[in-house]
Image: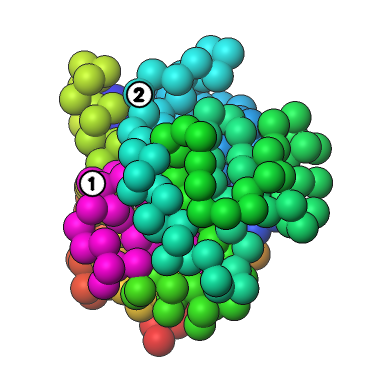
Amino acid sequence: MKLVVTDIDGTLTSGNSVPGPVREACARLREAGWRFMVATGRIWASARPFAEAIGSDLPSIVYDGARIVSKAGGNFCKDWRLSRDTAEEALSLCWDSSLVLQAYGDEEVSCRPEDRLTRDFFERLGVRVDPHLTAPRLSYDPFRIILYGDPAEARAVGAKVRESMGTRVEVTLAGEGFLDILPRGVSKGAALKAFREESGLEVDFVVAAGDHLNDLDLLGCADLAVTFRDAPVEVVGAAHLVLPPASSMGFLDLCRFIEERDTGPVFDKEGMIGRRGHPLYLGVEPS
């Protein structure tokens, strides 16, 4: 079994759909025996169209690793939660920031009453939105807290939460200006490890693709770690291969790279001269 695990935003696509040439390349790889998984910060309702577009027949890693979702009917096969007390402590530390704030429950989102953007986005997806978050208090154990807005403020708030809460939570930047607060030990990489251990599937070769700091653990699990030219320097340092950005369909370049080296049962590493810290740049100039 040869597996490609991919982030969505900034990796698989730079827009709201998977480009046609990328879909076609994924179909060719499936015919050659490759299988696909999605590993994203999105909730299942938002991630599902992308998983279907690339023909994934395996569960998806969503909520930045806090849930593993079975494709059949959106059934959840494994998840991890923040305790309500821990979540409320984190919310209190973030409450006075100007960042947009969301707490994620079971395919539902809590937000502040004035947050019309969150309400409109999730209601279009058919996801329940509770717009009554008027204080750092919740009625459930959430899977994830996300804040977004000014990148400098997101970094500062993240540092504040790390300093105050230590290792009781995971704090990561999930994009430019996006801050995630997750249960301890949760990441896309940890979710992939749990899936492999509990599914019993024998995976011979893993390609993982991602573009931001929340993808670092995922890239660390891969035989071939792939990122893109616009990724942060820490992510580039964790990759074997650096490709053009998603806006230039860098994922299509990845599919072609795999096709050129795919010899059937075995993925041929010859020519994969990059190594972590000294990646191979394909189609782009090193920084």
Residue 96 left/right relative to 68: right
Residue at x-position 25% and y-position 41%:
190
- In this view, 92 is above or below 184: below
Q: Nearer the viewer, residue 62 or 241?
A: 62
Which residue is denoted by mark 2 in the rendering? 78
Which residue position is annotated with label 1?
185
Location of the C terminus by quadrant is bottom left
- The kind of residue tagged 1 is Gly
Question: Mark 1 packing: few (<14 Cα in 10 Å), some, or many (20+)?
Answer: some
Circle 1 SS class: loop
| Image point (61%, 33%), residue name | 108
Check disc 2 and report its element: helix, strand or loop: strand
Image spot of residue 49 (x, y percent): 66, 32
In the image, 123 versus 216, the foreground residue is: 123
Say whether residue 4 is visible: no
Where are the magenta residues, as a range?
161-186
The residue at the point 75 percent across, 29 percent down is 126
Q: Is residue 177 magenta?
A: yes
Residue 132 vs residue 33: left or right?
right
Q: Position of residue 46 (x, y in %)?
A: 64, 37
